[in-house]
Image (tube, coloured by chain):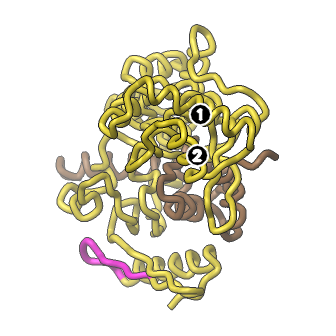
Chain colours: A brown, B yellow
């Protein structure tokens, strides 16, 4: 390993951990609620973007209806 | 539900998290909201009167749209033109009075009285032990999805000051591992061999994705040479394709009726394997949106 490789490998390790923490590696999210709870908060001034954030982290999430349920604060 | 939290932008959160996140972050947001209202020509007194107008209108008539609430402000002689209305709604939300309520026909968002819609009054400030507990919860939950990270990362992401970020992390110090690089992570969640050894799968991320917003700096996933193509300025963060965790392309979707077309603009050379995986992602976006991929 060269000296230049060391920082690159350290950054790659940080990237891997953060991507996994973000559910981007194994898509563990089973529902929009679970994903939002895991991330704590998903920026949503662009609702389409927030929905796509959930999709990228879930295992074949059902289409928009379930994310709409989370987006609206409808009493449960 | 969606509300103004953290950095003062709209966030989607679980209902049970909204209450404490609002109470923890609203005091930090209020200064900025009042400043923006002043810029829109709405002084402090008028802004407080507007919150009262919202409260009475929603209390007597139930959920109302932005236009309907604007009419009430106009009748009360309070300015609602330009960006004033959205900042007044933001102020009322940060004061715990209103929340986003039902969506009416033609996707018109209605606003509701928080106590009617959530079934209880919302606190907009925490003190003492309750605040300490909230900071502890914030620090722990942040690290679950963002570790390893620094106190400055937490402060930036949550829109709180550095002292509070440090207080939250200190409160859970016994649960943390401090790394040689100064970052911290939750014990038991340190770099697992499975995530270190294999390449990270390509993903298409939408505009303002949390992966681009979770830390003070994006250098770990967005090399500086390409930063201007993803973050062009004006507060915009473009949709990106990540390959092995790195931003490898920007992408755009064009929707027309029941169809969607997705175009990918690589930031550099893209392997055939990665391009194929991103096409699979595009197919999944079409499925998710109930459209046909063109």
* Mark 1 to mark 2 CA distance (whole Å): 8 Å
Question: Residue B58: which quarter of the image?
Answer: top right
Q: For the point 53% across and 45% down, which residue is it? A: B11
Q: Is residue B80 above or below residue B37?
A: below
**Is residue B65 at least partly visible in the picture?**
yes
Measured as percent of width and height from the top left, residue B203 is found at: 47, 68
Pick whichever, B184 or B114, lies toward us: B114
Are there few (<14), some (14-19), or many (20+) residues within 10 Å of tag 2? many
Residue range of the region highlighted in magenta in the rendering: B262-271
Question: Residue B155: which quarter of the image?
Answer: top left
A21 vs B265, left or right, is right
Q: Secondary structure at mark 1?
A: helix
Q: For the point 46% across and 37% down, which residue is it? A: B78
Q: For the point 33% across and 36% down, which residue is it? A: B41
B89 vs B157, left or right, is right
B176 vs B105, left or right, is left
Pick whichever, B252 or B26, lies toward us: B26
**Is residue B150 at least partly visible in the picture?**
no
Measured as percent of width and height from the top left, residue B230 is found at: 29, 62
Number of the label disc, if any, that sits on residue B159? none
Measured as percent of width and height from the top left, residue B254 is found at: 44, 81
Q: Residue furthest top?
A: B128
Q: Secondary structure at mark 2?
A: helix
Q: How many marks?
A: 2
Residues marked 1 and 2 touching at CB (< 8 Å): yes
Measured as percent of width and height from the top left, residue A55 is found at: 59, 64
Number of the label disc, if any, that sits on residue B53? 1
Q: Which residue is mark 2?
A: B69
Q: Earlier in the sequence, mark 1 or mark 2?
A: 1
Pick whichever, A31 or B196, lies toward us: A31
């Amino acid at each position: 390993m060269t000296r230049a490789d060391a920082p690159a490998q350290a950054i790659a390790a940080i990237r891997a951990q953060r991507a996994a923490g973000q559910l981007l590696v194994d898509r563990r999210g089973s529902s929009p609620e679970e994903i939002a709870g895991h991330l704590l908060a998903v920026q949503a001034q662009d609702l389409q973007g927030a929905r796509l954030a959930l999709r990228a982290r879930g295992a074949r999430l059902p289409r928009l209806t379930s994310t709409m349920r989370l987006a609206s604060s409808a009493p449960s | 539900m969606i509300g103004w939290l953290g950095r003062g932008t709209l966030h989607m959160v679980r209902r049970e998290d909204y209450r404490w996140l609002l109470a923890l972050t609203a005091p930090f947001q209020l200064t900025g909201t009042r400043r923006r209202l002043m810029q829109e020509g709405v002084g402090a007194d008028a802004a407080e009167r507007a919150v009262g107008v919202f409260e009475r209108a929603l209390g007597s008539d139930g959920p109302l749209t932005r236009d309907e609430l604007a009419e009430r402000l106009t009748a009360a002689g309070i300015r609602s033109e330009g960006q004033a209305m959205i900042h007044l709604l933001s102020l009322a939300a940060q004061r715990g009075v209103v929340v986003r309520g039902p969506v009416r026909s033609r996707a018109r968002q209605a606003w509701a009285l928080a106590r009617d819609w959530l079934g209880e009054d919302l606190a907009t400030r925490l003190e003492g032990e309750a605040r300490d507990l909230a900071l502890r919860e914030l620090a722990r939950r942040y690290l679950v999805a963002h570790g390893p990270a620094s106190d400055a990362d937490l402060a930036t992401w949550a829109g709180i000051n550095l002292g509070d970020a440090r207080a939250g992390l200190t409160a859970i110090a016994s649960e943390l591992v401090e790394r040689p690089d100064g970052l911290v992570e939750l014990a038991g969640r340190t770099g697992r061999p499975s995530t270190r050894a294999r390449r990270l799968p390509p993903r298409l991320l939408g505009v303002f994705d949390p992966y681009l917003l979770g830390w003070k700096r994006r250098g770990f996933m967005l090399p500086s040479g390409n930063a201007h193509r993803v973050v062009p300025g004006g507060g915009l963060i473009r949709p990106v394709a990540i390959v092995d965790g790195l931003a490898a392309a920007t992408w755009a979707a064009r929707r027309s009726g029941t169809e969607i077309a997705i175009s990918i603009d690589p930031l550099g050379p893209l392997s055939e394997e990665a391009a194929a995986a991103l096409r699979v992602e595009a197919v999944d976006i079409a499925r998710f949106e109930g459209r046909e991929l063109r």
